Amino acid sequence: MNPARAPAIRSRLALLVLAPLLAAVVLGFAASTTRRPAGDIATAGLLSPWASKRNPLNTYVAKFAWAWTTTLFAAMLLTAIAPPRAVLRYALATLYWLAMTRWFFGPPLFDRLFVRTGGECQLSTAAPADSPYSMSACRAAGGAWAGGHDVSGHCFLLLHSGLFLAEEVLVPLLLLSSSLHPQARTASPAARWAVVAATLGLVAVWLLMLFFTAKYFHGFDELVSGSLLGVAYWFAVYRVRLLPL
């Protein structure tokens, strides 16, 4: 394989992951005839098992998407020699995920946006002066997080994960361990292909989850914002290269 073709092949691999993931969101939204509030668990089973946040794939796979992503990235590091910058890009991708969904000097950015756009924690009793300012705190207090712009966390996380896996797992194992860079081989072909197969399997799960997320949850604007933010890190780091990583 001609090394000069490597950048083009890298780009195509990422786009081959991005295109079906975005298509799943579009098709899911187009297929939707019934949408329900995210907290309406009681009626979820009347629509479909996939309309419930308690379905097994969501409970045990999607909710731990970054843990699965980390596991596959670690497996790649064990089967191919990756440059130190790959670990730095992983650390930055993790910080991006944490800032958006877990913590950003207090509530995460998604929760801050939700409150700024009119959202609040609706409690069964009168809300105290220090009403919960994050979704996790609201749910812990027995309240409902409602009223604001609820960025689709699934669209964000699954796109962010899928694109990271394409660039940092599939590309190294399919290209860097090929004839382009024979010195990068450190494991048997069987081990490398096992990681590739596991990665593609996880991306297939992301496709399924994105379809049903768009079909049963969130409005169009929330799906769009989640998708744009899910693509943002990949676009900035791998396409525009705003950072020298």
Image (spheres, rainbow, N blue to C red):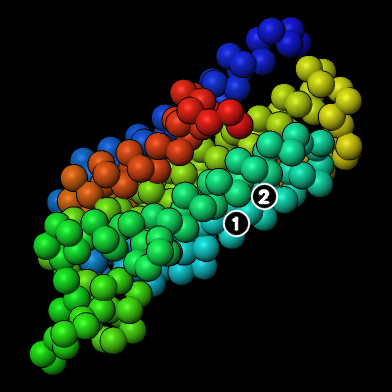
Residue 136, percent across and down? 35, 75
Instruction: Residue at 40% x, 37% y: name it.
Output: 232
Q: Amino acid at mark 2?
A: Leu
Residue 210, percent across and down? 37, 48
Q: Nearer the viewer, residue 107 or 105?
A: 105
What residue sits right under mark 2 in the picture?
72
Quadrant in the picture for residue 30: top left
State yes or no: discs 2 and 1 in contact (Cβ < 8 Å): yes
Eyeballing the image, is 45 above or below 239?
A: below
User: What is the total number of numbered labels drawn onto the structure image?
Assistant: 2
> In the structure shown, which secondary structural element does the residue marked by tag 1 occupy?
helix
Which quarter of the image is occupied by the N terminus?
top right
Label 2 crowd bin: few (<14), some (14–19), many (20+), radius 10 Å: many
What residue sits right under mark 1 in the picture?
68
Quadrant in the picture for residue 90: top right
Instruction: Residue at 33% x, 39% y: name it.
Output: 228
Instruction: Residue at 21% x, 60% y: name it.
Output: 114
Image-based side of 51 in relation to 184, left or right: left
> In the structure shown, which secondary structural element does the residue marked by tag 2 occupy?
helix
Kindly tell me whether residue 204 is visible in this rendering.
no
Q: Amino acid at mark 1?
A: Trp
Tell me, for residue 36, which label it has, or none: none
